[in-house]
Amino acid sequence: MTVEPLWEVFVRSRRGLSHTHVGSLHAPDATMALRNARDVYTRRQEGVSIWVVPATDITASSPDEKDEFFDPAADKVYRHPTFYDVPEGVDHL
Amino acid sequence: MSHLSYARAMDSFQATIDADSRIEPRDAMPDGYRKTLIRQIAQHAHSEIIGMQPEGNWISRAPSLRRKAILMAKVQDEAGHGLYLYAAAETLGVDRADLLDMLHTGRQKYSSIFNYPTLTWADIGAIGWLVDGAAIVNQVPLCRCSYGPYARAMVRVCKEESFHQRQGFEILHTLSTGTPGQQAMAQDALDRWWWPSLMMFGPPDASSTHSEQSMAWGIKRHSNDELRQRFVDMTVPQADVLGLRVPDDGLVYDEVTGHYSFTQPDFTELYEVVKGNGPCNEKRLATRVKAHEDGAWVREAAAAYAAKQMERAA
Amino acid sequence: MSDLFTYALRLGDDALIAAQRMAEWIAAAPQLEEDVALGNIGLDQLGQARSLLQYAGSMDGRTEDDLAYFREEREFLNVQLCELPNGDFAHAMARLLYFASYQHLLYDELRASADETLSGVAGKAVKEVAYHVDHATQWVLRLGDGTSESHRRMQAALDELWPYTAELFESDDLVRRLPVAVDPAGLRDEWERRVLAVIDESTCSRPEASYQHRGGRSGQHTEHMGFLLAELQHVARSHPGATW
């Protein structure tokens, strides 16, 4: 049985926005993957640009490591503008 | 994974479910959760692609070019929906080719509604109005399913399907205000599709095998009987607008509860059709298997070509 | 019947009958992605057919449905290539390569027509059929240069349909005297250049034909056409005067 590679599909919905993951599909090669993505994921004018990436080429963070990956960012509140007091009457800051 | 870290992962799974957050593909999850999802998503995907057949049956005969275009777009959507759903199932570590193989060998099921034949043009209206109507009642809660990829696929499916039910209602409305022949066709379609549509919500809660655990896992949000009631309450007034008679002598509106009481469908028929004893079971599966087998040489050719191109590039 | 009416019917009937055959592939394609792709192509063709039949109908008070459902076989003016029954997937892609490549050249030129409706339809359709050509090309390459079985099937399909391509480029008094029309005879060389380039790259051999099928433009069809129309028309004809 022929197993066709899986491709992840990213679509830019309109100019000015970044590509967003919309789903996946099967195709024998990149050329067909791009065309299939056009037919499957942009039938209703959902996009102006498409990326396809072999699913096996994606390196993902592991959910097992999510504590050490993402928790240390939690206490760095000074990275957010709402951390700072601004005296009343000061605009454009 | 050690016992301790497994226990911790399961706690984290349960905490995610309890917080009504979403489980994502690489999260640890109980084996039963994974299996239940694979079974349900695959069955859902199979239903979409088998469901192309009863309607595809009428594309070549659609009585106006406008209707032909709408029907083509609808059947095409169903292929797309099958595809989104297979993709969601694949995030759980199964391959679409294996799922298709399970369908083709009868080891996984699809919705029994598609084992009924489409005999007249009005059936296309009835499928859109009743079958897609019932599907929407079933599917809208799935947009909040605890498994992220399934929920996201369902958001897309529900958005695209919003025209499916309307076009079905429009077909029947045109027929029921048309010639006597067209009116009779519309009533006949409702008479045949009403009961199978009620069966789409599955067996009564008292005898539903998978329901309780699925509710606890946030895969299912409402019981079969709740959804069936919702469908009847929604549909009966629409039948009145169409001037068609719902074929249930026991149908009564209860002023106090605000719900219709109605006759339950014959669930022995549902069990029989699920077992394979419906009017179109064999035909639907044979057609599907034939398309797959007829396409084998094409898929092999595409793979061979891709391999040659890689070799040439290397 | 005016020349313009007849001309719009020719183009519209080509698209309508091609769409009817293409739609038969939905739920029968080699993979799900292809079901969706062929659905898109069929919908494009049907859309072109509707625009052209509406235009033709506007000239003598008929609707697109009057023209699609209530004409007799001898009144249909499509080329025979479009009406032949579906074969295997190679057959579908060979037909699409031949037909869409022709349509692409035709619409491209028709964009400059002085007839605003025709140029408008062509302007929209030329983009659609460019995609059809690409789709067919991709598959002809893959099937021709895939496995030995796919090569054999692709070659057989290219050979079988080639004798039906001459009709696409048939010139007659009507296209020569109708200033807003494109004389398809002028498209032949470029069509051959493009189609043969794809066939060469696919490793198939160039088809040769001694017999050329003709007659569609004057309403003479193959034996398959009657069955196609029976299916297409029977519901509408069973309920005369009904709306749908």
Image (cartoon, rainbow, N blue to C red):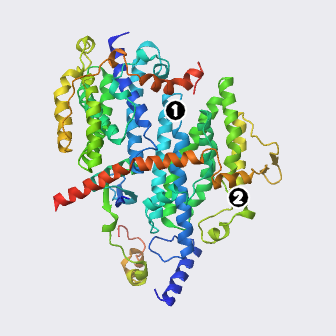
What is the chain identity of the residue bearing mark 2? Answer: B
Q: Do the residues labelled 2 and 1 touch (CB within 8 Å)?
A: no
Judging by the rendered image, the residue that carries numbered circle 1 is: B67
Q: What residue type is labelled 1?
A: Arg
Which label number is shown at residue C225? none
What element does badge 1 sit on? helix
Q: Is residue B104 positioned above or below C129 on the image? A: below
- Respond whether the residues carrying marks 2 and 1 are from the same subunit: yes
Residue B203 numbered tag: 2
Task: Give coordinates of residue C191: x percent, y percent.
Answer: 20, 31
Name the spot of residue B3 as percent of width and height, x first: 51, 89
Task: Reply above or below: B151 against B25.
Answer: above
The amino acid type of the residue labelled 2 equals: Pro
State whether residue C52 is above or below residue C32. Answer: above
Q: Residue at x 41, y 70 (%)?
A: A89
Which residue corresponds to the image point at 57% horizontal and 57% vertical from the top-left? B109
Q: Is residue B245 left or right of residue C64?
A: right
- Residue B296: x and y in percent read 38, 51
- Quick one: SS at disc 2? loop
Image coordinates for residue C88, horizontal then vertical, percent: 37, 40
Choose the circle earlier in sequence order: 2 or 1.
1
Which one is in front, C179 or C207? C207
Give the side of residue C164 with respect to residue A86, left or right.
Answer: left
**Residue B154 visible in the displayed image:** no
In which quadrant of the rendered image does the C terminus of chain B lie?
bottom left
Residue drawn at point x = 46 percent, y = 14 percent: C61
Assess disc 1: are there few (<14), some (14-19) or many (≥20) residues with their C-alpha within 10 Å of its C-alpha: some
